[in-house]
Image: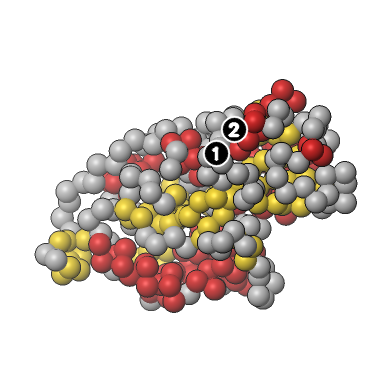
Amino acid sequence: MTTAFSKFVLGLAGALVLAMPIQASAQVDRQFGGEIELVDPDVLRVCADPNNMPYSNQAEGGFEQAVARFIADKLGRKSVSYTYFPQATGFVRMTLGSNLCDIIMSYPQGDELVQNTNAYYRTAYALVYPKGGDLAGVTTIEDPKLKGKRIGIVAGTPPATYLARAGLIKDAKPYQLMVDTRRENSAKSMIEDLDKGTIDAAVLWGPLAGYYAKESDKDYAVVPLTHEGKGPATAFRITMGVRPADQEWKRTLNRVIQDNQDAINEILLSYGVPLLDEQDNPISSKTGKTPQEASGPKG
């Protein structure tokens, strides 16, 4: 897992620093191997960014928050609470590592800052372009139809390598990787530029591509980049992050994921997240529910 990807998934922000769990008195003893787990037994305490859609915001409108409400219900938790902190330098240390919350809802598998649950979705960077235009049918960055087109790309992300290899960088429009999501949003800006015709296509991390394409008044194709050949990975498994000591909590979450994967998929799909199975086949909605219908009322 690249550092750049971890930064991108965690809000297009700066480098994260190593979390240092606080040795505090336990709220509950799970009696697992003699270890005390600092997990609230009554409230699902979530670490979240206050302004990072489609993941989360203070209005609780993100898909992480919809999944959190669903999980809380399945676990019989009385409520969901949030510790908000911008997903920039120190996010893990100031939230999960300080025992202010018990779960980070989206974390790339293999990142060493947290303990990962089993992956609950898999997605990829995606190419976004107008449906029915001269780019119709494009599925790879090396497609000749992209020659001479101005493509939006977030600097430092894996697809930039493929743009360079295809000779498309000279015409590309770069967008910032490391931004403060309270003030800037590279994904939203890129889709707005696509709306205006400033760029001809956009390459974004899948959840961002799907959500902002869906929010636009334009009709866009969102094509996961899963056929790029040798080079950096473009598809990744996303987990939930917990403290290294919270082994039983991880197992509890793994059981919820396993028992409710189809329902979790529906929540993610309702936000436009392009889901992929392990063979890179798209996972489609079985119900067509809205985000509110899929996740239930806010608690």
Number of numbered labels in the structure image:
2
Q: Residue 24's spot in the image, x, y percent?
A: 17, 51
- Does residue 70 appear to the left or right of 145 in the view shown? left
Which residue is at a point 43% across and 43% down the rendered structure image? 1
Q: Is residue 34 visible?
A: yes
**Frontmost residue, 185 versus 261:** 261
Which residue is at a point 77% across and 47% down the rendered structure image? 138
> Badge 1: few (under 14), some or many (20 or more) residues near its Cα, within 10 Å?
few
Answer with the quarter of the image where residue 276 lies: bottom right
Q: CA distance from mark 2 to mark 1?
A: 8 Å
Q: How is the image coloured?
A: secondary structure
Which residue is at a point 25% across and 62% down the rendered structure image? 247
In the rendering, which numbered label is found on residue 150? none
SS at circle 1: loop
Which residue is at a point 60% across and 69% down the rendered structure image? 266
User: Which amino acid type is shown beneath numbered disc 1?
Assistant: Gly
Q: Is residue 82 visible?
A: no
> Badge 2: few (under 14), some or many (20 or more) residues near its Cα, within 10 Å?
some
Disc nearest the viewer among 2 and 1: 1
Q: Residue 9's spot in the image, x, y percent?
A: 51, 44
CB atoms of marks 2 and 1 within 8 Å: yes
Instruction: Determine which residue is flagged by label 1.
Output: 231
Q: Residue 271's spot in the image, x, y percent?
A: 63, 59
User: Which amino acid type is shown beneath numbered disc 2?
Assistant: Thr
Q: Residue 229's spot in the image, x, y percent?
A: 60, 44
**Frontmost residue, 119 versus 87:** 119
Dot 2 or dot 1, earlier in sequence: 2
Instruction: Determine which residue is flagged by label 2.
Output: 161
User: Eyeballing the image, is 291 above or below 112?
Assistant: below
User: Eyeballing the image, is 215 above or below 200?
Assistant: below
